[in-house]
Structures are given as C-alpha cells and as structure tokens.
Amino acid sequence: MKKYRASIITIGDEILIGQVIDTNSAVIAAELNKIGIWVHRKLAVGDDTQAIIESLKEEEQHSDIILITGGLGPTKDDITKQVLCEYFGGKLIVNEKVKEYVLYLFNEVYRRPVIEVNLKQAEVPDVCEVIHNKRGSAPGMIFRKKDKIFFSMPGVPHEMKGMMEDDIVPMLQKEFITQNIIHRTLLTAGVGESFLAEKIKDFENALPTWIKLAYLPNNSMVRLRLTASGENIDKEINSQFEQLKKQVADFLVADEDITLETKLGKILNEQKKTMATAESCTGGYIAHLLTANPKSSSFFTGSVVCYDKRIKESVLDVDHDLLEKEGTVNETVVIQMVKGILKLMGSDYGLAVTGLMGPDAGGEDKPVGTVWIGVGNREKIETQEFHFRFDRRRNIEITAVNALNMMRKFILKKVDS
C-alpha cells in the first residue's frame, strides 16, 4: 500500500515576521494524519510571486498532495490566486455561484454595502475546481497536475478548518487508499524528559521497528506517544501502551491525549466534588485553564484574583499583621488563602498560589521565581515551595501546571485513603 506524502505551504508576510502564529499547519496535519496521510514537509513563504512559485515547484517534487493557505483575500497584498493562475496556466474569471454567495453574505448576513473589492472574491482561475466556503467569502480551489493534487484554502483559521473537515478530508478519503495510523498518547507531570528517557530506555529499545515512541515536553509535563501504521496493528500497540503506562506509573496523569486541567475536571466530576482558586501571582490563569473546559460549571465554583495584599486581607481573611511582617509570599499566607477561598466559595477543595513572577521585586531571601502553592479541603491543607528560573510568562504557566498537579494528587490521595 502506498504511503502518500503531503506538503503544507502557508503564505503571508505576517507569518514570517512573527506577527501571526501559524496554527493552520497544525490543524491540517492533524486532519491528514487521521486518514493516514503523512505530512512530509511544511513551508512558510511571504507574499511574493517568485517565492510562492518556487515553493510550489519544490513541493510538487516531494509530495502527492500540496495544501496551501493564505493570500485569498480581496486586497492588493493577497496575490495567491494570480500566482496560481500563472503556475497552472489559467486566467481569472468570475464564478457566478461565488458572486451570488458573496452578494448574499453582504446583503443578508453582514447587512452592509458590497463594494467592488468584495466582489473580487468571486474571481477564480478558470483551471480550478471551486470549493464553497461555508464560513466566509473567499472560496477554496482545487488544481490537478498529472498525478498531483493541490488545494488552496483561506488563511482565516476557522474558515480553513471548516473547509478541511467538510470538503477536503472527505475528498481525499475517496481518492486515496491510505494506511491506518494509530497514536496512543499518555501525559506525565513532575518529571523531566531526560529522566523519563533513561527510565524507559529498555522499553524503547525493545519496541518493534514499526512502532515509534515520541517525547513531547512542555512546561513540566511530558507527553509520550506511540505511533504505528499498517493493518491489524491495534492489539500490538495497545499491548505496548499498557507496558509503557506501567513504566511511568509514578508520574502518570492521563492515559489519553488530554490536558492536565481536563483530567482534573474529570476527576472532580467523577467524585461529584467542586474546587475554587485563590490566585495572586498567576492572575487568574489557573481559573482560565479550568474554565476552558465546557463542563467546568459542574466542578468549578469560582476564583479570587487577589493580586493586591489588601484583597488577600479583606476578601480572604488573610491576617493583616502577617502580611505586614512577613510579606505575601510564604507558607502561612498561602494556607490562609486556601482557608479563605474554601469559606468564601463553599467548595470541597481549594487551591491557592502566591509568588514572585519577575522580572522585578525579588531579593536574596525570596528571589524571582519563588512560589508557594497550597491545596486542600477543610480537614487538611498541603503546601509546597517552588523556585522557578524562567521569564514571567513561563513562570506563570509552570506555576499553574504544578498547582493543578498538586490538586489532582491531593484529591486522588483522599479518594484512595
């Protein structure tokens, strides 16, 4: 069975100068992987005719399927359609169906006048098949050259995603017979990538050649992913995955590809318990992570962002004299913050963080990166001091990871006891 290769070309100066992060490539790669098509290469080019043509020529040599995003808007800097005309030997014509849809959008949906530049969206190369854009005005396009197929999609992420899911993936599934690809992913926390690699090196060395192990570290967490392709592979990869889980049991957070905060939410829902947060140095970031879960209303009661010490005192009943004498970053303060949030929110569990994120305000006794985390319930509170060494943003992110993991372990410990 042939292993089909795909290339992704993202077009736009904004990507090359770092003004916009290319999320489209990740979405495209994930969708293709689900149907057994491997992304072989990924390339970003600016809004430059020659650069786009060179990228098309190059990727045509390497891949069976080339997917392009960006440059389909109506303004002068959007040159993709003109370049594709040149590359495939066509000319721009008005597609009446697209024109009709653009008029409908502006007259009935947007309810604003249509100007000439908007109608340019209806111009497409006469050598392409048009893909209807259900989420916007710029149509997608399909080009064929010998045994290669090219897809051009809008750069707007939600428009591109809809086109990928609704049109391109189903078309590829009909036209290409692909290999089955299986991923099994688990999440660990509180352990480094190098330690994990040493711990499971014998397991990794003994893996069949057709099963690959990948390490995906991020902010004090490491995902481990097993990947296999072929027929009748489910039983073997599942067996290897169970062995891997045993190898990393002490650090295992989830045996599926989900986030730490999602796993914590699942645990709370299973136990029919609730939690709340009192956040100083993280400024509500932990609450943000938890409430990104659409089911969070069933387990998350609320949060107090007590950045100023007066809020710690007036809202969470942290002792005034303690704050004046010892400051805000110490074990006693974080314990009182946990007690205060439990009382205020009436939740089963409370989580509190206080610390120095930087880059200023640190000292010899409490350098930047010093953080106290507390988690607990009305019977018991556990605390831990951390010393992070990164920039402000990463210190906040890693504090959140460690706080959520402490909460997870505290709840599971209570259940087991």
Image (tube, rainbow, N blue to C red):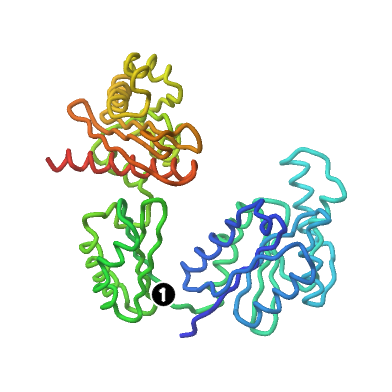
Q: Residue at x 87, y 50 (%)?
A: 116
Residue 254 spot, x, y in % from top left: 30, 53
Residue shown at the point (79%, 48%) measured from the top left: 103
- In the rendered view of the protein, which quadrant contains the C terminus? top left
Residue 152 vs residue 94: left or right?
left
- Looking at the image, which is closer to me, 84 or 119? 84
Q: Give x and y (percent) for residue 232.
A: 32, 78
The amino acid type of the residue labelled 1 equals Asn
Residue at 48% across / 70% down in the picture?
35
Outermost residue on the right side: it is: 116
Residue 303 image-quadrant placement: top left
Q: Residue at x 53, y 65 (%)?
A: 29
Crowd band around label 1 with a 10 angstrom C-alpha radius: few (<14), some (14–19), many (20+): some
- The residue wearing badge 1 is 180
Residue furthest front as drawn: 364
Nearer to us in this view, 326 or 267 = 326
Q: Pick the residue in front: 128 or 405.
A: 405
